[in-house]
């Protein structure tokens, strides 16, 4: 079940063992790989031959380099190769880390750490704000009762109104942490349908919602309400970005579902995962905030509170999943990945 590609190679270069990830990557069965000359699997066979020779001659115990792994009817895969000596003289372990995967793992790890730090910061900050807020509002109310001039009560009204606004912001910041996780069987298409109806009620004209569903996706255990909120937040952002296209009648919002097999995210390999894309043809996420959109209070929108995607990410993480965004003008794709049983 390792995500890394692993082979055990005889010092003469023949493969003794290949794991499932290596079979997958090469597009060959284990039987076809075992016994073959492993260096032939690479665009440049010399590198591995030299490494094996060096290890055989005890020049070094381990070696790392980058190479291209050949694949059946697919383009070669860039990998980081780690060749290590074992206790048995004749057996050498060769690990291959797909380079893109390693970069992605690093990025995911960094993001997860940041998200955790963010969450704690927000929770603490929200509590700190919440406490004095009640006092401020109460004092303004008392003051208002003492004041006779209507002109002056306008000021106390501003204080009360702004305190209320801050209160509701703080409540929204604390909401995902407080809310119990209601677990049941979730049908992702039912979730998309709910969101589609809500979106069409708000944007009845000029927007075409396209459904591209893989109906074979099984139900899974999850919190339906949280997932509706997640997809709604993402779809809502798309529609807000689509203002111009909606006015012209050319706006499209696509819900695309499919099953991803043998995918790796959050450092784990999943046999099956649900993949939901929410795609719009709007102007794209502004470059200036592109790598921060999942952070709280980051907004590119007049009047936006910058919480929608933070909430979405928290909810998806509670389902052990991941959200990614890929955006260029004319095509913005938010991808939600959730492991399936
Ligand atoms: N589909 C999209 N197209 C273009 N920009 C987007 C898209 N989705 C998100 N964004 C950008 O990301 C920002 C952050 O989104 P987020 O939902 O977190 O906050 P918000 O929409 O500004 O406020 P709210 O808390 O009301 O949702 C948005 O303000 C917008 O600039
Ligand atoms: Mg939003």
Image: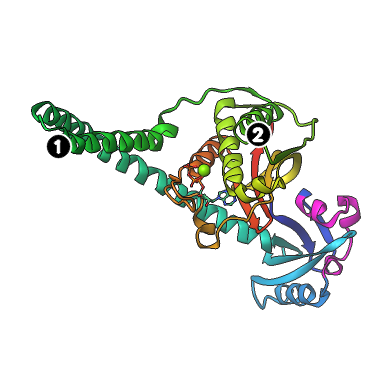
| Secondary structure beneath label 2 | loop
Closer-to-camera residue (70/62):
70
The mark closer to the camera, 2 or 1, is 1
Label 1 neighbour load within 10 Å: few <14, some 14-19, many 20+: few
User: Image check: 321 left or right of 96?
Assistant: left
Colour convention: rainbow
Q: Which residue is mark 1?
A: 152
Residue 81 higher or lower than 234, as above or below: below
CA distance separating discs 2 and 1:
44 Å
User: Image check: 173 left or right of 324?
Assistant: left
Residue 123 image point, x, y percent: 35, 40
Closer-to-camera residue (179/233):
233
Residue 155 image point, x, y percent: 19, 39
Q: Quarter holding the C terminus?
A: top right
Q: Which residue is mark 2?
A: 204
Label 2 neighbour load within 10 Å: few <14, some 14-19, many 20+: few
Q: Quarter holding the N terminus?
A: top right
Q: Was residue 253 drawn as part of the magenta stretch in this picture?
A: no
Ligand 1 neighbours mark 2 (CB distance < 8 Å):
no
Q: Which residues are magenta?
A: 21-42
Closer-to-camera residue (121/16):
121
Residue under the point 45% across and 46% down? 306
Please identify the quarter of the rendering in which residue 76 is found: bottom right
Residue under the point 54% across and 30% down? 226
Q: Was residue 28 drawn as part of the magenta stretch in this picture?
A: yes
């Amino acid at each position: 079940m390792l995500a890394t590609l692993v082979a055990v190679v005889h010092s003469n270069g023949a493969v003794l063992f290949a794991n499932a990830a290596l079979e997958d990557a090469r597009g060959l069965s284990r039987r076809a790989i075992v016994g073959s000359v492993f260096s032939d699997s690479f665009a440049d066979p010399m590198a591995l031959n030299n490494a094996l020779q060096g290890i055989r001659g005890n020049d070094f115990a381990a070696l790392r380099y980058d190479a291209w792994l050949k694949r059946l009817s697919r383009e070669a895969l860039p990998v980081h190769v780690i060749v290590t000596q074992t206790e048995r003289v004749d057996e050498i372990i060769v690990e291959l880390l797909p380079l893109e995967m390693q970069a992605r793992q690093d990025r995911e790890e960094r993001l997860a750490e940041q998200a955790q730090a963010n969450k704690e910061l927000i929770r603490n900050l929200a509590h700190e704000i919440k406490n004095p807020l009640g006092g401020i509002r109460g004092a303004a109310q008392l003051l208002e009762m003492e004041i006779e001039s209507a002109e002056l009560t306008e000021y106390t009204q501003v204080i009360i109104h702004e305190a209320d606004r801050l209160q509701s912001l703080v409540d929204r910041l604390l909401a995902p942490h407080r809310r119990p996780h209601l677990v049941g069987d979730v049908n992702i298409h039912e979730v998309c349908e709910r969101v589609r109806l809500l979106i069409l009620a708000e944007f009845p004209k000029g927007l075409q919602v396209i459904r591209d569903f893989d109906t074979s996706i099984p139900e899974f255990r999850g919190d339906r309400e949280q997932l509706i909120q997640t997809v709604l937040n993402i779809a809502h952002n798309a529609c807000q970005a689509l203002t111009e296209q909606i006015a012209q009648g050319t706006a499209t919002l696509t819900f695309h579902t499919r099953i991803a097999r043998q995918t790796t995210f959050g450092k784990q390999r999943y046999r099956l995962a649900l993949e939901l894309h929410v795609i719009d043809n709007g102007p794209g996420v502004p470059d200036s905030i592109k790598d921060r959109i999942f952070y709280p209070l980051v907004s590119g929108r007049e009047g936006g509170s910058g919480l929608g995607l933070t909430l979405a990410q928290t909810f998806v993480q509670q389902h052990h999943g991941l959200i990614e965004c890929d955006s260029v003008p004319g095509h913005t794709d938010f991808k939600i990945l959730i492991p399936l049983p």
